[in-house]
Image (spheres, grey):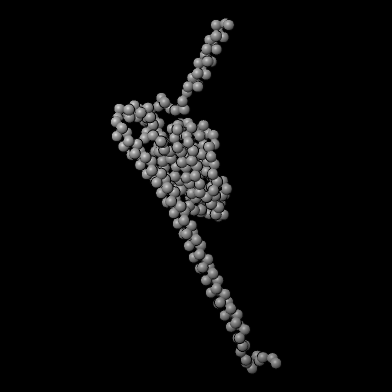
Amino acid sequence: MSPSLFVVVVAFLNLVLLARGQKTEPFSGLTDQTLFRGADRYDFAIMVSPGETECFWQFAHQSGYFYFTYEVQRTMGFLHGRHITATARTPKGFLIDKSQDIRGQINFSTKETGFHQLCLSNQHNHFASVQVYLNFGVFYKGADMANDQKNEERQKLNDTLDAIEESTHKVQMNIFHMWRYYNFARMRKGSDFFTLQSNYNYVNWWSTAQSIVIVLSGILQLYFLKRLFNAPQVTDTRKPRC
């Protein structure tokens, strides 16, 4: 084997070993000041215009749990179709899950670290805007991401403090899931409120229109009945014929 070929083979083997040992933690050379990762969870409402798509990016570490909940609260415009398409993609752009309904949830475990993409598409409604309430974020089983350091610290603590910490973490996780269910209930309440308001306006407008039609029809009936009973004036030059 020639020396140049031997160097090429060694370099190739080194690249293979590096690729196998590489983690999915990107941006290792960047600090927290240069990379804005945002908060772990968000909840807000957004208006999606007809035929448009709105996308958001949520940072999540590997071995986390991602949740994404949405609900269409109201529509504005013609052809009030309330269905919307929601998609979730990995940091590399691969589709994780898709939901097409009035309301839905997308939950998954994060396999790699990076910014996951969440999109809402209103392509089905070309003449109506939709207001969508969103609640998404990521949570982890551990109290924080520094698991190795925490394991070392826990070994130095006694069993009592370890049990207290574990119980406290369980309480925090239960409170977090209660907060998720509360947001979902608030989402449904907002949707029901806008539905009731829309029905109320619909009933009022139709009641007003029907009342106007009834009054106008009564006036027209009186007018034609009056014309039927109007007798012509009799004069010397103008007398009714037998």
- Number of numbered discs: 0
* Quadrant of the image occupied by residue 214: bottom right
Residue drawn 50% across and 64% down? Answer: 203
Classify residue 113 as left or right of residue 231.
Answer: left
At 51% from the left and 68% from the top, the residue drawn is 207
Q: Residue furthest top?
A: 2
Outermost residue to the right? 242
Quadrant of image for the N terminus? top right
Question: Residue 46 location, x and y as percent?
Answer: 46, 47
Pinpoint residue 235: horizontal percent, then vertical percent. Answer: 62, 92
Q: In this picture, is 212 found above or below 117?
A: below
Could one spot residue 46 in this view of the protein? no
- For image coordinates 47% across by 45% down, the residue present is 69
Residue 75 visible here: yes
Q: Is residue 196 above or below residue 134?
A: below
Would you identify the image quadrant in which residue 213 lies? bottom right
Residue 22, percent from left and from top: 47, 23
Q: Tell which residue pokes out farthest to the front in this image.
A: 159
| Observer-nearest of 152 and 35 | 152
Q: Quadrant of the C terminus?
A: bottom right
At which x and y percent is residue 105?
49, 44
Front residue of 148 and 139:
148
On screen, 54 above or below 223?
above
Q: Position of 142 compared to 207: left or right?
A: left
